[in-house]
Amino acid sequence: MIPSRFPPRRPRIRENVNEAIRAREVRAVFPDGSVEVMPTPAAIRKAQDLGLDLILIAPTAEPPVAKAMDYGQWQYENKKKQHEAKRKQHIIQVKELKFRPNTDDHDYDFKKNHAIRFLQEGNRVKAIVQFRGREIAHTDLGRKLLLRFAEDLTQHGSVESQPRLEGRNAHVMISPNKVAPPAKEKAEKPKAPPPAQASN
């Protein structure tokens, strides 16, 4: 048998679970709702008698809080929470739109509509005017186009800085407007009609 060059894999140590808990005592929470401050080894034994693991859930508390539960279920719930948080998190991207100094109105409107959609999605928009050949002598046309573009988007975004020229490109950066969430209107309960007076 050929000896392996690699050392045997060490068993994976579960952090903050059972014997990996280093605190001398913990505030142990059990499935029946009982809470007890007790030595950590005793809490581990009690959890294992129930067929569960002792998991440290609040290590900075005094004493640390540990809960008796199934380790696999705890991992599943943690992953589910992380997935939900990642799904709700929006990553702001910079969307680039490129123009030429003589861009026609149809192409301009097409890209402007794209920019509106990008801003409504919460992304930033970078509009770039590219100058080729002798077009560099007419940078004023590119500047006018960028100013027009920024003005057409004022309802959806705000200009971070004035258009500027870098090499053969002029650009402007537009950020989405922060829209305050609509205030929840309290539904007014219909007033009860006054009690009918008995007629004599």
Image: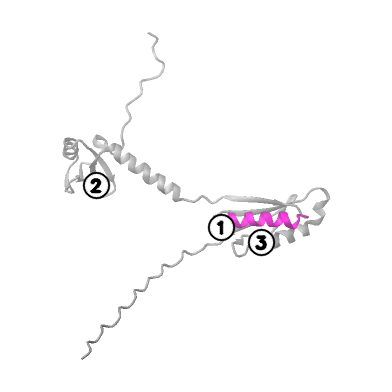
Q: Is residue 101 left or right of residue 58?
A: right
Q: What element carries label 2?
A: strand
Q: Give the crowd class for mark 3: few <14, some 14-19, many >=20 residues within 10 Å.
A: many
Residue tagged by mark 1? 120
| Residue shown at 37% from the left, 44% from the top | 80
User: Could you tell me how far apart the alpha carbons at marks 2 and 3 are, in whole angstroms?
Assistant: 55 Å
User: Could you tell me how far apart the alpha carbons at marks 1 and 2 are, in whole angstroms?
Assistant: 44 Å
Q: Give the crowd class for mark 2: few <14, some 14-19, many >=20 residues within 10 Å.
A: many
Residue 193 painted magenta: no
Mark 2 and mark 3 lie on one chain; the one further toward the N terminus is 2
For residue 171, which quarter of the picture? bottom right
Q: Where is residue 64 in the image (x, y as percent from the top left)?
A: 24, 46
For residue 11, which quarter of the picture? top left
Question: Which residues are the magenta region?
Answer: 102-118
Residue tagged by mark 3? 150
Residue tagged by mark 2? 65
Residue 103 painted magenta: yes
Label ID, residue 144: none
Label 1 sits on what residue type?
Gln
Q: What element carries label 1?
A: helix
